[in-house]
Image (tube, rainbow, N blue to C red):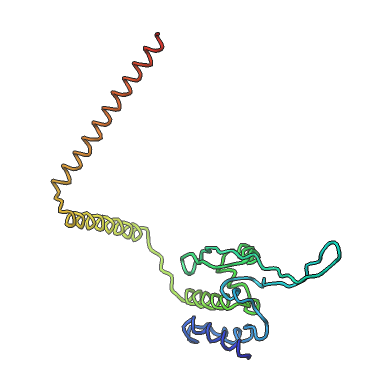
Amino acid sequence: MAFRSREMMKKIVKKIGGENNLAPGVKEQLKRSVPGSKIVMGRAHRGLYAGRHIQFGNRVSEDGGNKSRRTWKPNVQEKRLFSYILDRHVRVKVTTHALRCIDKAGGIDEYLLKTPYHKMDTEMGLYWKTKIQKMYEDLGEMELVFFSPEDEANIEQQFKELKLEERAARREARRKMYGWTAKEEQTKDEADFGDTSVLASKGKEGNLHTDFHEQMMANA
């Protein structure tokens, strides 16, 4: 294994948290798939490029056929992709080709699980693939527990009571912060209600005045 490959392998294992967090057989696959002599674009290590890198060629003039060197860079976009196993959005730089592959696979989790290691030629792709594969294996070993309808109703009622307690705690914190009492809050609410009723009555009087003026203009 080349020096560059060993360094990439060390980085991936360190990010995952050690060799103990690797699924069985993953370490050998990583050693075989980590590129040894293949030159990978620097920014491709920080995203999912799906094999798309800088291409080199010639620009040929129309008149004399003169050739000058040029490059073609991949179409890279920064996207927020939702991961079901992480239960959050992941911000990552991907190429449009990788986006089509992710849509075809059914999501970023399925794309990382279905894509073999030897096609993940970037450090970030290998890291996310090994991490998500380990998380799905741990999820498969967990025991599922199903709740009865009565238990679900009790849990929902407990959540409602917890929300009411939090609301009461926030109200009490506001009272202590501003020095309000229950009577002051009631009078303040009544004053606000009185102001709104006065505004509503003024609005009605204004509407009556405008209607009467329009009727006088129509008669004239």
On the image, which quarter does residue 29 sit in?
bottom right
Q: Residue furthest top?
A: 220
Return the x and y of residue 176 as percentages of the image width and height. Answer: 16, 57
Above or below for 1 versus 208? below
Q: Residue furthest right?
A: 64
Residue visible at 18% across and 54% down in the picture:
178
Nearer to us in this view, 139 or 185: 185
Above or below for 212 versus 97? above
Residue visible at 73% across and 70% down in the picture:
70
Return the x and y of residue 219 as percentages of the image width and height. Answer: 39, 9
Quadrant where the image shows the N terminus? bottom right
Nearer to us in this view, 154 or 181: 181
On the image, which quarter does residue 207 sit in?
top left
15 lies left or right of 163 = right
Quadrant where the image shows the C terminus? top left
Residue visible at 27% across and 27% down in the picture:
202
Above or below for 11 versus 99? below
Nearer to us in this view, 89 or 218: 218
86 lies left or right of 60 = left
128 lies left or right of 148 = right
